[in-house]
Image (cartoon, grey):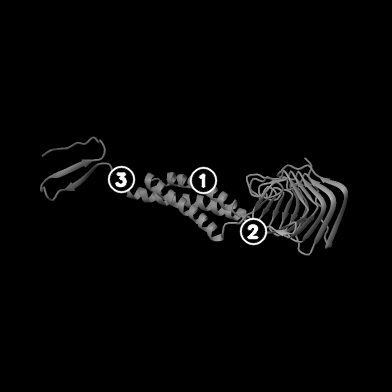
Amino acid sequence: MQKHNQTRFPGFHVFNVAGNGAIIKTSSDDRDENTWVKMENDGITFSANNLTVTGFNTGLENMAGTCIFNRVTFKDNQKDYIFDRDWGGAMLNVGITMCYNCHFENNEAKHGGAIFNQGYLHLDNCSFVNNDAENGEGDDICIGDNGELIYDGQNIPSNISNNELHVTVAKSMSLAETTLIETACIVGSLLVGTIAGIATANPLIGATVGGVFGLAVGGLCASVVINSHYDVHFNRLKHALICIGGSVAAGIVGGIVGGYIGSSLTPTSTNGARIAENAANKGILSLVYDEAEAIEMTVL
């Protein structure tokens, strides 16, 4: 497997590539993190024309700056990460990107098979063929939070699905909804752990049940939260740890506390006899034995 070597050009504010029909190609697994061009700073302009970009995980990752492409083909680029953000097989745009007479074919990612856009994207006379958002949004283009798309002079504010173009406008769940889901998972795990501990009167069993439940519900919570956000700046790891770690910890704590509560509520027996005097039946002595014991008794 070949790893694409990334070259940095510090000190330049404008960078032009005249392709002359060249093919920029690398051999990448879909999780190699090979990127052809990565823009990280404002005030930088990158332009390219008359070339083909193929085999990358993302051809362009424009987190800032301006990119201009003319007669560029993005083909066979794909992303499929287990946890990390896998958006935009050909392009991930948060800055400004303008494409003229470009072609996008057979690119694949979870959201935005060809392009994930959360910035300003201008497309003029561009074509899209056989791009795929695998189990996600926008086979050709997914527009994330606050993204703007101008396609052949028209602003695209909503979903499009026809023979030429598939666009999905995605909106993240709100911070309040995210917090509510995370809180519900943590509190639910705490309650389940506590109930399990009380029912078994055993802190170890209660902690185990609570922890396992917290892991399951926390994983589900993390999946829902992460898959409901379309913002490249959203901290996926942080919220996964809140959902999973918080739910597991709450379940264990609840199980331990519930176990001690349960054990304190359960009557415990002691060896020997318990002596009780019945005031209503004076002179009657009752002996109650908890366990079978060998007892010698002398009757006077």
Which residue does the numbered mark 2 point to in the structure image?
A: 145
Residue 39 visible in rendering: yes
Which x, y percent locates residue 228? Answer: 59, 53
Mark 3 is on which residue type? Thr
Given residues 207 and 103, the one toward you in this image is: 103
Given residues 166 and 144, the one toward you in this image is: 166
Residue under the image location 48 percent in, 54 percent down: 184
Numbered mark located on residue 268 in the image: 3
Q: Which of marks 1 and 3 is nearer the N terminus?
A: 1
Q: Which of marks 1 and 2 is in front?
A: 2
- Counting other residues with Cα less than 10 Å from the Cα at mark 2, is it few (<14), some (14-19), or many (20 or more)? some
Q: Is residue 260 left or right of residue 161?
A: left
Helix, strand or loop for disc 1: helix
Q: Is residue 181 left or right of residue 102?
A: left
- Counting other residues with Cα less than 10 Å from the Cα at mark 3, is it few (<14), some (14-19), or many (20 or more)? few
Mark 1 is on which residue type? Ala
Vertical comparison of 79 with 152: above or below: above
Mark 2 is on which residue type? Asp
In the figure, residue 204 lies in which quadrant?
top left
Q: Which of marks 1 and 2 is nearer the N terminus?
A: 2
